[in-house]
Amino acid sequence: MEVEINSKRCSRDTDSPPTVSTKKVNNRDSAGPVRRSEQQTMLSPSNAPLPETPPGTSKGERPPSKRGSLEIRKSEGVTTIIRLPKPDKSDSKSYNLSNNCNISYHSSALTKCDNQILKILVDEIQAKAFHHHTNGRPEARKIVWFGPEYTYGGTKISANDNWHPLVTSLATWLSVEYQLPVFNSCLINFYKDGSINIPWHSDDEVELGPNPTIASISIGAARDFHMRPKGSTNIAWSQRLASGSLLIMSGATQSHFQHAVLKDPKVKDLRVNLTFRLTRDGRIPEDLPVSDQANPCVLPVDSSITCDLDDEDSVRRRAELEAENLRRIRSRSNSSTGRKPSSQQPITQSSEQATQITKLDAQENNKQSTQRSDSAKPQQPATLSSNKQTNDTQQHTNTQQAHSATQQPSTKPKHQSSDTHTQKPNSYSLLQATNQQANTQSQQSSTHSQQSGTHTQQPDQASQQSAQAQQSSARNQQSKLTKISPVVFEMPVEAKNPIKFESFLKTNFPNIRIMSVKELYHSSGYLVFTNSPSDMNNLLTTTLKTNEINGHTVTRRLPSNRPLHQGDDRLRKPLKSPQVRSFIVKGVPLAVEAEELLEYLDENQAHLQFDGATRIISKASGQPTHLIRMFTKSRATYDTCLENGIRLGALKFRCEESHNLPPVKEIQCQRCQGLGHSESRCNAGFVCNKCAGAHFSGDCPKDTGFRCANCGGEHPAYSFKCQVVQHANERATENEHHRVQTLKLKLAQSRYLEPTQSLVETFGLPGPASYAEAVSQVPTLGPIAYKNKASKASDAAAAAATVQSAMPPTAVAAAPVQPALPITAAAAAAAQSTAPLDEAATKTKMPAMTNTDIAATSSAENGERGFTQGDVLEVVLGALNRIMEIEPGRLLTAWEASQLAIRVVTEVLTTFMNPRRVPAVRAGEAKATSVSGGRSEL
Ligand SMILES: O=C(O)CCC(=O)C(=O)O
Ligand SMILES: [Fe+2]
């Protein structure tokens, strides 16, 4: 059965409730968003008048009197939805994150009835929610799934065709009101409070097919939803998802972006999120409205919000393209309106910066005039916001004024630009490379994209335009390049927070078009790129509404004199995986497994974020200790645990730092003074390590005083005082610690899992080729190896003869003596590993045994005196064979050999020190060998 949306789809503007009729198209009886039996009750027939107070509304329930609220009826404890209100689309927004990666956000889609929906979700669905397992571990978040079998987080969720009427209605409502596919699946996430999150992921399960459309309804507490390009840790887009909001992700969003709802300790209330999906499992008719046609849920794109999936080059290319378009629009609008440049000057921070900007504007103007003469026919007049126009006017003024005064060379081929910065340290923003060819098509497409925020586009037009924009961007790649200096925003490390910084920018510079933001890792702050000198100027000089982030002052400046270059140290991204810290939790009972502790903490102390835990094994004894090493990528978690310890129920464990490694110094390039690479790999020009001038450090006139090439401070670039150097060293040290910790972890694991060395390799002795061979040799050497650590060959021979004489005949036959045989590695390992135990036994336990146990044994054994060497040997052999079942032919690792030896000796010791066990040993042996050593058995 399938829901068919009537032609009502076209008459959305009417105030009538959504009308849905059903039609049988196949024999699917229960799967899918709408079941026939439910539909009849929950969907009102076309245009049927709705009862004022629906019959069956439970007592005490808010009557759905207000038009626009959810109309419900309760039957058999389940709420049936009679009508969902028409959505308020007035504040819907749409974003194009990159090519064909579309998001639309409808903040008031269900705000009229979100409370009612929340109540139903809590009362009727929440109880069914379960912890889904990802990678074998239960997630803190609880979910409910409606739809066919689905793989989620790498684990299957079984089909659930028992749709709740609310969810069914919402699926239908989405289709009717937003022209979305009729979704056949819905995942409901329950976030009990801000401690519950959904980690970074893409909804790209195969069942969803390529370019799936996902509709996500949020009810309850508002939470921040973030998006970032795959492979990047920079958040590209964030939105606080309000209660009753709808977010639609479509196009290639899932292929290129990941999304997440991160933990937010400030949120104390429940949030429920319903993501509707269309899965393909063969049960869904092919002809569902999920076509390749432009997805109607993609609203006209607001191109003022963009982000880049690509590297720095593409960021710049995009900036160039847009700058170019802007210039064209300006030149056209200026020439068509005949506007006169105003004399107003932008406020500048310093005269140096002002000159710099003026020069740049002059160059820009140079190009504008070339382009003006190129474009014979004026293009469609540009529609720009009034604010932009003001900026442009200012810009134009600057350019006009500066043009006559400044005659900078305005053209330079791109490939030469890297040389330029060696010539003139202060000329980063002046670097230019232009190509004189104008690209009319790119103008058109970009003009559209400039306007698209205000004009409604048809979907096919939109896709055509995006294709054009793509082509023109490719062409522009080789054409124009104007480098505009980014502005450095500095703040202390503690204040750094990409989300807060983004909102800082939005608050203070609502009208400035910011192209991209890069985090500086070697000094503390961000680089903010704009696409026009006037934007850059405004960014530098605008009076800030707030100049604080997290209570720390934010300062602005141009980048240091050393020009930035591709792959510049100052733009280096952090390691893909953030640094992992580890610390030791002390006194954890052996009964508590490390994994268990981890799970407990995940569940109960969600503000702490751990990435692993492992019990520490004592090197000396090979036994697990009471220490657990915890791994975390979160500095906050690390600090909290060290300060407060870790709680497990009523228990509290102290946490301590692991032993610190000595600090590591980051390498510094002697050529450009950048950190993290050496001069042999550096293509940049020479920068002096004393004065930051563009010359080799050895040629420095020295009387210029110190100026750091990295931070601009009054010290040499290699100074330990330099913040940049300090940061780099800290990072290098942390990385090194991480590396060592990872190695240690691997080593600890390999002790258990991966045999790496054979006994022969370990001990450098000619030994047995296999475990079986080693065992077969033990009878000749066992007691000797046990007693004489030195195990010289001569002793071995002598002792072997003694052993042989004392051995029962069958044992001798089974294990021929090899008197002069060199000691086997297993025996050597046994000897070495057991020596301390042996000594301990001699010193402490043996006297006790002679005095008490032997007396008991003697009486128990009817006056027999103690044990023979043969007894010992047999117990050893029995223990050896019983303890470890190792496939014949496999070589043992040193670890395994020593474990084997320890366990054999332990067993032998306990057997002989606990006389009650001896008869049992003998009884077993008697059966096996028919040898009793002449003793009577009890
Ligand atoms: O809770 C949300 O907003 C996101 C949920 C989500 O991404 C998912 O379920 O895949
Ligand atoms: Fe998702």
Image (cartoon, grey):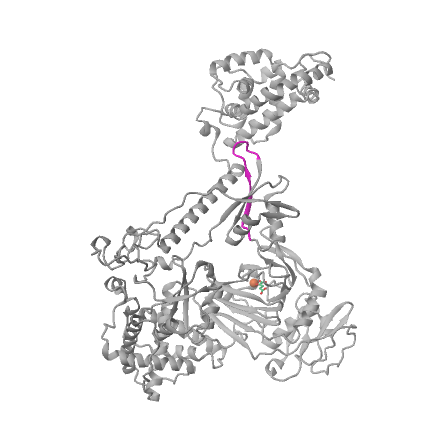
How many circles with numbers are drawn on the protein?
0
- Report whether residue 1 is seen: no
Which quarter of the picture shows residue 869? top right
Q: Nearer the viewer, residue 734 or 177?
A: 734
User: Which image quadrant for residue 553?
Assistant: bottom left
Query: Where's residue 865, x and y in %?
Result: 67, 12
Q: Position of residue 543 (x, y in %)?
A: 41, 74
Q: Nearer the viewer, residue 697 or 749?
A: 697
Say which quadrant the N terminus sits in.
Answer: bottom right
Is residue 511 in view from this perspective?
Answer: yes
Whether residue 444 is situated above or below residue 585 in the rendered picture: below
Magenta segment range?
Answer: 609-623
Q: On the picture, is 874 further left or further right than 316?
A: right
641 up-or-down from 510: above or below: above
Residue 622 shown in magenta: yes
Q: Quadrant of the C terminus?
A: top right
**Would residue 283 be counted in the magenta stretch?**
no
Q: Position of residue 367 (x, y in %)?
A: 28, 77
Residue 567: % across, % down:
34, 58
Which quadrant does ligand 2 occupy? Answer: bottom right
Q: Which residue is painted at 23% across and 78% down in the image?
A: 405
Q: Is residue 771 left or right of residue 35?
A: left
* Residue in front for this viewpoint, 518 or 717: 717
Looking at the image, residue 67 sits to the left or right of residue 584; the answer is: right
